Amino acid sequence: MHNTHHLHPRFSIITVTYNAGSLLEDTIQSVITQTYKNFEYIIIDGKSTDNTLEIIERYRDRISVVVSEPDKGLYDAMNKGIDRAMGDYVCFLNAGDELHEDDTLQLMVHSMAGLTELPDVIYGETAIVDEEGHFLRMRRLSAPEKLTWKSFKRGMLVCHQAFFARRDHALPYDLHYRFSADFDWCIRVMKRSKVLHNTHLTLIDYLNEGMTTRNHKTSLKERFRIMSKHYGLVSTVFHHLSFVVRLIYKK
């Protein structure tokens, strides 16, 4: 008996936000207009002082959980989201990011039609968009055909937003990392995962925001530490050398 077509997972979609009222509404709309209805929407707000709470109020009946209180930063807020999530999968959409289409969740579930049980991780591609939501380009790094925990030796090949983790594998984010805890988290989730399912779909429209260069440096240092922790120092240095060589020869 292979009744595999009725995998009907519940998604916990979590938006962590702080003073991003101008961006939040599009994100909320991209979630609540999904044709697939088996999801909960959780908004964790860091006690915004702009119009964020008015916007949330406008859609309050469509949002399962709203928390608005000060936090110790992005990853602390994300941990609050995981703590409150009840679904089979957790996924994080920042204010400004959107699910790619109104039927994205539906298509994700369809893509699992041949599977007998829910995968540990579901992943896909990411489109980069501008503030009007217009397509700019696909993300520079594209998802590998077969994702494993070793894939991120070459960098974060799957955007954190397009990485849906089984809630029972979703450990807390490590608050020691200020900018790259998501990178570490994805690797730790993948280490606990056996089945990582490639949807071959564009899942997310990611808002193109430049991280300040100062943060960028710290973020890269953190990534180096994370890679060394998971993959060993020698391997990490080796992979970074090949990056450097590639940069030199591409000029």
Image (cartoon, helix red, strand yellow):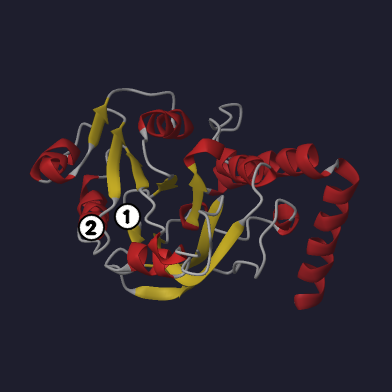
Q: Where does label 1 land, which residue?
A: 96
Secondary structure of the residue carrying numbered label 2: helix
How many numbered circles does the render carry? 2
Q: Which residue is mark 2?
A: 26
Residue 119 seen in the current view: yes
Residue 205, horizontal then vertical, whole percent: 38, 64
Q: Residue furthest front?
A: 1
Q: Residue at x 43, y 23 (%)?
A: 72
Q: Secondary structure at mark 1?
A: loop
Q: Report the residue at 47% width, 55% height from top.
A: 210
In screen coordinates, is 184 left or right of 64?
A: right
Q: Is residue 150 left or right of residue 137?
A: right
**Could one spot residue 204 in this view of the protein?**
no
Residue 214's x, y, as percent? 57, 43
Observer-nearest of 231 and 62: 62
Q: Are marks 2 and 1 in contact (CB under 8 Å)?
A: yes
Relative to 51, say whether 77 is above or below.
above
The residue nearer to you, when weighing 138 against 145, is 145
Type of the residue with mark 1: Gly
Residue 61 vs 130, above or below: the answer is above
Q: Amino acid at mark 2?
A: Asp
